[in-house]
Structures are given as structure tokens and as C-alpha cells.
Amino acid sequence: MIYLDNAATTLIKPYAVGAAVSRAMREAASVGRGAHGPGELAAKTVFAARELANEMFDAGGPERVVFTFNATHGLNIALRSFDLAGRRVVVSGWEHNSVVRPLAAAGAEIVPALGPLFDREANLRAFERALTPDTALAAVCHVSNVFGFIMPIEDIADLCRARGIPLVVDASQSAGVCGLDMKRLGAEFIAMPGHKSLCGPQGTGLLLVGENAPIRPLMAGGTGSVSVRHEMPDFLPDALEAGTHNVPGIAGLAEGLRFISSRGTEAILAHERELCLEAARLLEATGRVRCFLSPDPEAQTGVLSFIIDGLDSQTSAVRLGEMGVAVRGGLHCAPLAHSSAGTKGTVRASFSAFNTLSDAEGLAEAVARLI
Amino acid sequence: MLNYFIMCRSLTYAQKSARVLERAGIPASVSRPPAEAGDEGCAYAVRIAEKNLPRALVALKNAGMPSGKIYMTDRSGRFSEVPG
């Protein structure tokens, strides 16, 4: 099988990830509960992961790294930390439902800053216009999960800071691929999954909490600290980590972080981008495929959306799956992105650090057989 | 040997404190002190040797991590708060 659904979950992980998960399941217990060997191993494992993430993302301290179960969990914590009912929240035109739905549930007035696909300048100008004085929050994806479009997040962050508007960043598609620096962005929150480009297991995620972020627990429960109180602790990370941690998952995520650190995000992005460009070249050579490719290669990751003439995206993806090529069709949980791009669904091939040029060629050969 | 316990409000804070001390060349370990030391339950502490206490307090202060209450165990194992 050629696996090209890495924007959903990376399937092939570094060997050390699985080994760490297995070891933690056998040897590590709970963090901050029993003061015995398996408990201490759990505590050390989780703290090591916090330190790795803190170093990788310049989070401002290991305590500012909160473990979540996925990016959606982190985004819900982040977005529910603000009072948004009836208030203006500016988003990009490329948001996933993991941003849009929590905002809708909070009763926010969702205002997309719309710009053309792959035009970073125009998208930035849209934010300049949309970030009005009555804006309560900006919630922005770093990279579109549908098109791999890299938003000018640093510039948007500068705008937010200059205007005193809190910023929540959805780094679901950028963590592990693009440079991501909490201190540089000055965001209130950055949420990311562990199971995509960070190469961790499913059920893991990170929420980076900025120095000025409001702390409002989404869940309440045991933390192994200030236990006589009925209220949640008011300090990080305990305030946002009720209940038992996913220690095996976090152990695996730590190995994923080590892998990313050793390879470097620049090298990983360059590799994935090369495969994306080659796949697009081969697909377009069929004459029956429309690829969504940025004219500026710097504005796109290794995520490639395409449409096959005369074949809807879901059917295309199912047929390709039957031919041994794992891609995704449909809206990719991001109807806003399709509305912004004028599409009604795409086939998405998303590359990882472990894909090769032969995978890009295999995709194009399968599509050629399909048409 | 006498040991000092620098109280921390959370496990992560204790781990971070221990890391700061290790980087300053001061052996330190995360510890669960006796229940009487944790007036809010589930307390954590960083344990250090008696001779290292002054250096440890300076290292923590320099790292922007003010220390909490300090306890000690004497040679008989008795646990008591060190007056501030």
C-alpha cells in the first residue's frame, strides 16, 4: 500500500515510537499518583516529553506544555478560555471544523478573513481589515489541512499583538513540518496533534499556553496536586490536565519529537514539498487532473489537493484505495476552506517524512489507470 | 545525613526545580514529603543535601522560581519545618 493520508494521521512512525509505547504500557503507571517505581517512571517520561516540546517550540517552560488527546481537545480548551458569546472572532478562510465548531458552540460571531488560495499577501491584508477594535479573538490555522497553504502566521501574530487581540493558533498541519516558535508568535495558545507530523501515536496532542493566556479548565478532576481543594489548581499544567495522562502515548510522542529534532523541520518540509511537486507534475501530465498547487513553493507544504475530471472526490478516493493508494476525498472536515477556494471537495494526497518519490509515482500511475 | 525538602506546588514544578538544580551542579531529586508538610494535600518537594541549601536557593531564585516552605529531616528521621 502507498499511504498518502498523513495529514489525517501519519501511519509510518519511527521505530522508537512503538517501542516507547510498548515499554510505557508494561512499565509506567500514573503521573503524580503513587510514589513507586512505575509511577516515577511515568512522571519522568512525561516530564521528558514536556521538556522536549518546550525546547522545540520555545514554549516558555515545560509547565506551559499541556498534554491533550488531540488538537481538537487543545483547541476546545483554548477557545473555551475566552468569553466569546456574541463577540467577534476573526478566523482565516481555511479553518477546520476543530476551530469553527467550538466557536459556533460558544456563540461567537465568526468572521472569516477571506483571501485567495496561496496568496499570502492578500490573506494578510484580509486580516488587517478584519481585525477591528471590537475583535475579541483571532483563531487561525497555520497551514490549511485541505490545500497545504502556509498562512503568514508570524505577520498575523504581529498584527494581533499590535492591536491587543488574543491569538489562538491551530498548528495541526504545521507542527513537525514548519518552524513554530511560541515566543516569536506571542500567541495565547497553540494547539497541535501528536499523531500527525510529530509522528506520535493517536490520542496525543500538545497545547502550548502563553504567558498572558487565561486559564480556564475544560475538565475538572484529579491532578495529584492541592487535593484538599474542590476547585481545580490555578497553575499549569495541572489546571488543564485533569485525570490520568496517556502515558504510553506521551512516551511515543517524545520519540516522535526526538525524530523531528534530529531530522529538522526544514529538511522534512523540503522532502515533502519535493514529493508534492513531483506528484502534481505527474498528475497534471495526464491531462485529466486539476491540481491545487501554489505558484510560490514556499507557500505550500506536502499536502496536495486535486480533482479528477468527471469523477467526484469521494469516489476517486475509494477507487484509489481499492488500488492500494490511501488518500482522502471529500471536505476534509473543512467546509469553510472549500467555500473559500470555490471547491466542493477534493482528493487529498499528503506526504510524510517517510514517503519516497516512488510513492508519488505510484499515485500518478493509479490515477492514470483510473481515468 | 541531613536532608532539606524544598516544597513545590506541583509535580511538574518540582521536576523543573530539580532540573534547574542539576544544571547548577547540585544533586537533587523529586520527593513526596510526609503528609504533614502538605497542608493542601499531595505535596511534592525537591530533596537536597544540607550543605547545598544556600546554593540551591540562589539557583532557584536566579531561574525565576521562588522556593516555597522548606522542611528538613534530622538524624532520627524526624521531619520539621525550617523557620524562614
Image (cartoon, grey):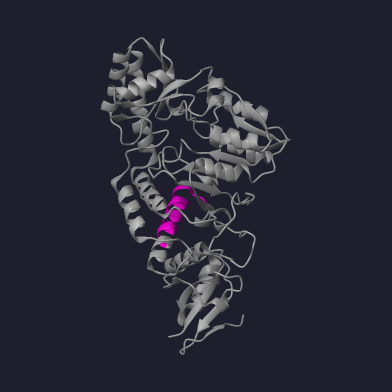
Q: Is residue A56 magenta?
A: yes
Q: Is residue A336 above or below residue A252?
A: above
Q: How many marks?
A: 0
Which SS type dominates the magenta stretch?
helix
Residue A106 percent coordinates (x, y): 66, 38
Rendered image quadrant of residue A155: top right
Question: Taking the image as drawn, is residue A370 in sight?
Answer: yes
Residue A20 percent coordinates (x, y): 33, 53
Residue range highlighted in magenta: A44-59
Q: Is residue A367 above or below residue A261?
A: above
Identify the residue at image location x=59%, y=59%: A235
Identify the residue at image location x=45%, y=65%: B19
Question: Taking the image as drawn, is residue A278 in sight?
Answer: no
Q: Is residue A344 above or below residue A287?
A: below
Rendered image quadrant of residue A231: bottom right
Residue B64 percent coordinates (x, y): 56, 63
In the picture provided, is A245 more to the left or to the right than A19?
right
Residue A284 percent coordinates (x, y): 36, 14
Q: Is residue A36 above or below residue A77?
A: below
Considering the image in quadrants, where does the N terminus of chain B appear? bottom left
Considering the image in quadrants, where does the C terminus of chain B appear? bottom right
Comparing A199 with A249, the one in front is A249
Identify the residue at image location x=57%, y=57%: A221
